[in-house]
């Protein structure tokens, strides 16, 4: 039976109108939802922090490359590529991610990839990249590829950070920073655990910004962890230890947002004047008495008035 034969034309149209409107609303809702998902999915943001310049070289600069998912959907299959540009044979020593794995660096290597996996909305992954600077300026370039929340591939524009060979610009602050180190125990015993303690202090009252501390330790010592402590629990410092058991990359690094002055930069009460770094290790088994050398390289956005190269040596016997 035809439904239209039971109702007049006007009544049939009135009966169908709500259903038609509901259909239109559902279709519109689906379209809007799809559009919203399309707007939410996007490539992550990539940022680099690192030292501005070094007065004396060769030196080991450390960079932090951060990948942040600013969308409302999960990014997946993320690969972060690092490329080092130089004119004198500088190379990438290592890259250490807070999540995922990175290819190995080494002499002659100027490009390596880090497979970071997936990144939830609002989450970040930090990759510590350590380079060997020879004598000239170097530029670290990092970019990411992967799949966004819509299933589409993305590729970010490379972000760069250049470290110069020479003094910082005249406008940067001049600060006197002390860097000292102390080994415990004093005598090296094969297979025994120990610590190397660095103390970094700024007592001038002038704030030093964006400090990078890299500690090159004898490759025979197996690093197990690195811990940073400061004048209070809110110190803006973080340290990265080599993968335990990796004998080729014995370079713990620390990144400190500021040292000395006020946290707000305007003479407030909150200050960070001292940071202590403890590197825990297992001593190598040696057949005769040996001397192990640990050297710390420090840089920040400014220049050091008391010790231009800020190098601290520790000899462990």
Image (cartoon, grey):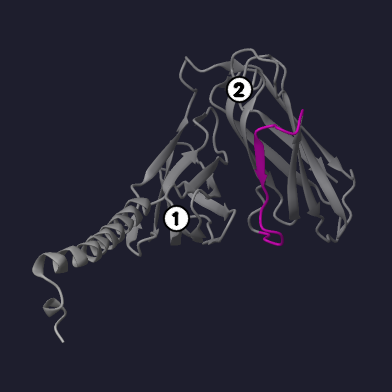
Left or right: 12, with 145 as reference point: left
Tell me the number on the disc at residue 208: 2
Q: Which residue is drawn at 14% across and 73% down?
A: 7
178 w.r.t. 171: above or below: below
Give the residue at mark 1: 80
Q: Which of marks 2 and 1 is nearer the N terminus?
A: 1
Classify residue 61 by image quadrant. top right
Query: In front here: 299 or 155?
Result: 155
66 relative position to 146: left or right = right
- Residue 116 shows in this picture: no
Q: Give the residue drawn at x 27%, y 62%.
A: 22
Instruction: Single out the residue that lies furthest toward the bottom.
Output: 1
- Counting from the top left corner in percent of width and height, residue 298 is at 62, 32
Residue stretch rendered in magenta on the structure: 231-247
Instruction: Give the alpha-carbon distance from disc 2 to disc 1, as whole Å.
Output: 30 Å
Relative horizontal placement of residue 83, taking residue 206 as reference (left or right): left
Residue in view at x 54 percent, y 35 percent:
57
- Residue 285: where, in percent of width, then height? 83, 61
Q: Relative to 183, say whether 95 is above or below.
A: below
**Residue 288 in magenta stretch:** no
Identify which residue, 77 or 87, lies in the foreground. Answer: 77
Local SS, label 1: strand
Q: Main secondary structure of the magenta part?
A: loop
Q: What element carries label 2?
A: strand
Q: Does the magenta stretch include residue 237?
A: yes
Image x and y of residue 188, in percent: 87, 50
């Amino acid at each position: 039976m035809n439904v239209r034969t039971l109702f007049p034309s006007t009544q049939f149209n009135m009966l169908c109108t709500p259903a038609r409107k509901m259909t239109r609303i559902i279709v519109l809702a689906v379209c809007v939802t799809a559009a919203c998902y399309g707007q939410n999915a996007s490539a992550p943001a990539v940022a680099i922090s690192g030292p501005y310049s070094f007065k004396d070289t060769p030196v080991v600069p450390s960079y932090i490359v951060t990948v942040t998912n600013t969308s409302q959907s999960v990014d997946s299959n993320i690969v972060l590529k690092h490329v080092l540009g130089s004119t004198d044979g500088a190379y990438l020593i290592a890259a250490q991610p807070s999540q995922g794995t990175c290819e190995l660096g080494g002499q002659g290597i100027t490009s390596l990839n880090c497979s970071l996996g997936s990144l939830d909305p609002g989450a970040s992954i930090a990759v510590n990249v350590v380079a060997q600077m020879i004598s000239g300026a170097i530029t670290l370039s990092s970019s990411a590829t992967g799949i966004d929340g819509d299933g589409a591939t993305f590729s970010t524009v490379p972000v760069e950070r250049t470290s110069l060979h020479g003094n910082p610009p005249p406008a940067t602050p001049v600060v006197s920073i002390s860097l000292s180190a102390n080994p415990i125990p004093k005598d090296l015993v094969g297979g025994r655990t120990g610590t190397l303690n660095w103390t970094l202090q700024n007592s001038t009252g002038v704030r030093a910004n964006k400090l990078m501390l890299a500690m090159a330790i004898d490759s025979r010592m197996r690093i197990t962890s690195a811990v940073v402590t400061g004048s209070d629990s809110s110190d803006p410092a973080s340290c990265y230890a080599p993968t335990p058991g990796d004998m080729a990359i014995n370079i713990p690094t620390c990144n400190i947002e500021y040292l000395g002055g006020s946290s707000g930069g305007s003479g407030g009460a909150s200050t960070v004047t001292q940071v202590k770094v403890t590197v825990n290790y297992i001593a190598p088994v040696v057949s005769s008495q040996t001397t192990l050398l640990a050297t710390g390289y420090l840089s920040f956005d400014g220049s050091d008035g008391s010790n231009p190269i800020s190098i601290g040596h520790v000899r462990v016997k």
